[in-house]
Amino acid sequence: MTETTMADGEKTAGGALAGVRVLDLSRILAGPWASQVLGDLGAEVIKVERPGEGDDTRKWGPPWLADGAGEPTDQAAYYLAANRNKTSVTIDFTKSEGQALVRRLAAQSDILIENYKVGGLAKYGLDYDSLRGVNPRLIYCSITGFGQTGPYAARPGYDLLLQGMGGLMSITGPKDGRPQRAGVAVVDLLTGLYGVVGVLAALTARERTGEGQHIDLALLDVEVACLANQASNFLVSGVSPGRMGNTHPNIVPYQEFPTADGFMIVAVGNDSQFRAFAGVLGHAEWGVDAAYATNPARVANREVLVPLIEALTPLRATQAWVEALEAVGVPCGPINLIGEVFDDPQVRARALRVEMAHEAGGTAPGVASPLRMSGTPVEYRHAPPVLGQHTEAVLGGLGLSADEIADLRARGVV
């Protein structure tokens, strides 16, 4: 398996965002995903965590990372997925001295990311209005379930809830089955990516204005925005789309089909691809039949066409179909287990698995960034940190002495 091994340690970022500092007060997934992407792009990311507890996902195991001897550590795989290229400092900002430390860090930061409930940081003097007085150039991204305004603003929001309320589950799952969520927390992940887009846009605006700004980012807003063509289908027709399993509301054939040894995906995107597909199936006449020759006709006649195809595809194994269809330019492929994904020759060639030396011993595996930048490539500088790994270094950078840090630690402030 193709792997890239990166040694941990203090490294100078040379990425596109080198020199940008991110203060990350977020936890779980949406916020940490955003800050990880920024870290991958070269930003310095300081993750502030609760002493003794840390990010909730540190405890979301098993599975747990193994140390150099193969023994499990207390590092949950979930946490590892979203926290590389960060330093971890533990600060209890329910205490006044902890609040003062966070304000000092904010004064030296370009971006702050947080995902507390609406108003949750105001009581500590760490809300946007308070910190704007400390650092007018600060870009402050607040991630919540429902946004800073509206009747639901005070409600907590989690990915599953928003997949349901935002409509995604109503279009996911078998036609006659129960609503289903996506297999990963897509609303959190998309919100993290929108967060990155927002802060990068705000950085660009700051170059013109000299001022930072507040970004109000809601999981609900992101989920509704990402309904994409399904939202447009409703807005144009007035009819709410329903669940269609793996079929597509606007394209046919675009779904899974049974084979002799499992299933395959066929994603016919235009009429010429359908003609090629019909030829491989042994029914070239379908490609010129008025009932199937165009995509609108195939959509109208899917209840007839799809069973005809499903009667033929079990006659060959998946790989045989894939080879035959790829030869004539029809998009297709197997449905891989995740373990098979990482053994796929294309995934190996793209080095999508990375390994980083970890403080707990051994190495932490991870998935490479999909961003391939010719001039400022992504660097994997730090494995996801253990809790408080960099507290002394970060606070020392604020000018605190070793004795002062030891005193704060003894009193539970850090």
Image (cartoon, helix red, strand yellow):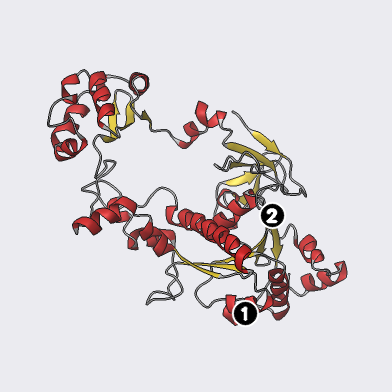
The structure residue drawn at horizontal position 23% and vertical position 36%, both measured from the top left corner, is 252
* Residue 106, image x, y percentages: 68, 70
Query: How far across and down, in percent of the image, does residue 259 sit?
Result: 29, 25
Name the foreground residue: 263 vs 4: 4
The residue where tag 2 is placed is 386
Mark 2 burial class by Cα count in 10 Å: few <14, some 14-19, many 20+: some
Q: Position of residue 389 (x, y in %)?
A: 73, 57
The disc labelled 2 sits on which kind of residue? Val
Q: Residues within 10 Å of mark 1 (few under 14, many from 20)?
A: some
Q: Is residue 405 left or right of residue 212?
A: right
N-terminal label among 2 and 1: 1
Write down the residue under mark 1. Answer: 130
User: Which of these two is toward me, 208 or 139?
Assistant: 208
Q: Is residue 101 left or right of residue 60?
A: right
- Above or below: residue 105 compared with residue 31: below
* Residue positioned 26% across, 52% down in the render: 178
* Residue 287 picture quarter: top left
Q: Can residue 41 be seen here?
A: yes
